[in-house]
Image: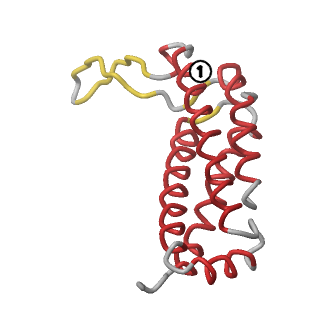
Amino acid sequence: MPLSQFPAAMNAAVPAILAASESLRYIRDTTGDLTWRSINAMQSDFRTAKTACLLAIAEANKSPASAQNYLANMGGPATLVLFNDGLSNIQQASNALFQAFGVWLDGLPNAEIRSVVNVTVNGVTTPQVVDAAFVSAASAAPLRTAPQLAALIVAFEGIGA
């Protein structure tokens, strides 16, 4: 039987899970313009957490009894079954959020995604396509209040985040 590195994998997963849940809360709880940087950070944090959790589950499967004992002492789900169920809830909620995110994105004015500006370099002015730095508060409001975002935050809370 291969040795399990569940404690190390779970210890890496915990900060990733917390970062992802904090990124989601940041989007929900901030006011004013919403930066694309914070939206991108949320997506990156979510991806990192998912990868870390998949690794933790793979390691847990090598020695389920000891992994479950370790998990139970961390303050999150008491069993591996509950942890797996929680991860499944997160996946379902994230699928719904990213579907809603696509609809929200489709409804944004082009200027809040990219625009053309004139740039002068060495005395020569040319148009250049640039990414917007932020989405206006009014445009961000539907994302911040989306029930899918709230559901994903609740799903993360279900595993202790």
Image vertical order of residue 53 relative to residue 124, above or below:
below
Task: Judge by depth and name the residue closer to the eye, 121 or 86.
Answer: 86
**Label 1 SS:** helix
Task: Judge by depth and name the residue closer to the eye, 139 or 67.
Answer: 67
Residue under label 1, please give it. Answer: 104
Q: Disc 1 residue type?
A: Trp
Q: Is residue 18 left or right of residue 131?
A: right
- Single out the residue that lies furthest toward the front: 1
x 51%, y 42%: residue: 40
Image vertical order of residue 5 relative to residue 82, above or below:
below
Q: Is residue 6 left or right of residue 90?
A: left
In the rendered image, residue 79, in percent from the top left (x then y), is placed at 71, 69
x 50%, y 61%: residue: 54
Location of the C terminus by quadrant is bottom right
Task: Judge by depth and name the residue closer to the eye, 23 or 134.
Answer: 23
In the rendered image, residue 65, in percent from the top left (x then y), is placed at 63, 81
